[in-house]
């Protein structure tokens, strides 16, 4: 929902620049909006674009490098109303699109830049990872999740839009019984008129952790991901990504072997890791984001992964 909310503001803004009021007149007859995204654009952004009437299949895909980062040097020529969707924290590799370069090209052509930063925006809180978000502040809108690293309940997405008037134009509803107050009216900022007060849990988590506590949580989880990669590599298995954040991709050999290891690990029960596909190969995806995970948990889980993998490989001999 955070991507949807921010991209709704983006759609309205780029059409407003072209002299079209999409809230009043809809998309029929409106100037064409070009949407540009990387090959690794997340499914939530694609779904949001479809829900907004911009078309899932009309996204102009920009090639990505080996880590899933959009190639800024391969951005197409931008002309007319355009939204560029980049990401911070690839769902598989954890990689970050080159924000500064993308924003420079896009803004030179008056395009809107949206950042899908479900995981990655939180890297800004940590001394060792803050460099990853360089240039993100130059974008026009951002979306992130609080239910991941803040560990609050689901449906706790957060949308940020540089100019609130664009967000209000996309989200507002007018009725006789909706009397505007002098303070902030929540229904001007979300699709729903009624929703649970998820902001309370987010505020409570941030209030409890503080700046240093949040930084420590993220640093610990990223360090744990590095430990998983180190241990699995030492065990003879292939790490498929550069571990820059909290995600690790590992292959245990042939795709069938990798899938069997994942299934056996899930059945064994010490920890849970899911399957993904990376550059055409099956991989096990490790994402460390819980405040409760300890170094001891990591070592137990790593031991289980190695034991299960060796067992599966032994059956195949």
Image (cartoon, rainbow, N blue to C red):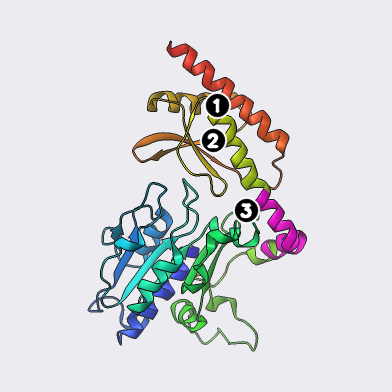
Secondary structure, mark 3, is loop
Q: Residue lying furthest right in this view?
A: 208
> Is 6 rendered above or below residue 273?
below
Q: Are marks 3 and 2 in contact (CB under 8 Å)?
A: no
> Is 64 rendered above or below residue 136?
above
Magenta residues (range): 202-219
Looking at the image, is mark 1 or mark 2 earlier in the sequence? 1
Q: Is residue 154 visible?
A: yes
Left of 23 or right of it: where is 5?
right
Looking at the image, is mark 3 or mark 1 earlier in the sequence? 3
- For the point 63% across and 55% down, the residue is 128
The percent position of residue 286, horizontal first and vertical second, equals: 54, 39
- For the point 57% across and 24% down, the residue is 306
Q: In which quarter of the image is the C terminus?
A: top left
Label 3 sits on residue: 149
Q: Do the residues labelled 1 and 2 touch (CB within 8 Å)?
A: yes
Q: Residue lying furthest left in this view?
A: 29
Distance from disc 3 to disc 2, alpha carbons, whole Å, reads 17 Å
Secondary structure, mark 2, is loop
Identify the disc placed on residue 265: 1
């Amino acid at each position: 929902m955070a991507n949807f909310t921010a991209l709704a503001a983006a759609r309205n803004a780029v059409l407003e620049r072209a002299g079209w009021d999409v809230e009043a007149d809809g998309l029929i007859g409106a100037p064409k909006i070009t949407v540009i995204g990387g090959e690794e654009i997340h499914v939530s952004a694609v779904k949001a674009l479809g829900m907004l009437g911009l078309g899932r299949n009309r996204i102009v895909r920009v090639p990505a490098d080996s880590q899933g980062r959009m190639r800024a040097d391969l951005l197409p020529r931008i002309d007319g109303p355009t939204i560029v969707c980049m990401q911070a924290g690839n769902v598989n590799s954890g990689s970050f699109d080159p924000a500064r370069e993308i924003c420079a090209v896009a803004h030179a052509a008056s395009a809107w830049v949206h950042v899908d930063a479900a995981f990655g925006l939180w890297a800004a809180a940590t001394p060792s990872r803050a460099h990853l978000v360089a240039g993100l502040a130059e974008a026009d809108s951002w979306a992130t999740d609080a239910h991941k690293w803040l560990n609050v309940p689901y449906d706790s997405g957060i949308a940020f839009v540089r100019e609130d008037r664009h967000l209000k134009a996309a989200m507002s509803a007018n009725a006789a019984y909706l009397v505007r107050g002098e303070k902030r009216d929540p229904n001007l900022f979300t699709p729903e008129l009624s929703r649970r007060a998820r902001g309370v849990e987010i505020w409570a988590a941030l209030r409890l952790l503080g700046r240093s506590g949040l930084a420590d949580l993220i640093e610990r989880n990223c360090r744990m991901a590095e430990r998983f990669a180190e241990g699995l590599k030492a065990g003879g298995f292939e790490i498929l990504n550069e571990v820059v954040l909290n995600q690790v991709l590992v292959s245990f050999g042939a795709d069938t072997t990798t899938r069997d290891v994942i299934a056996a690990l899930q059945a064994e029960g010490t920890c849970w890791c899911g399957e993904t596909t990376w550059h055409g190969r099956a991989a096990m995806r490790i994402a460390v984001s819980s405040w409760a995970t300890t170094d001891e948990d990591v070592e137990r889980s790593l031991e289980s992964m190695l034991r299960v993998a060796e067992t599966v490989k032994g059956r195949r001999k």
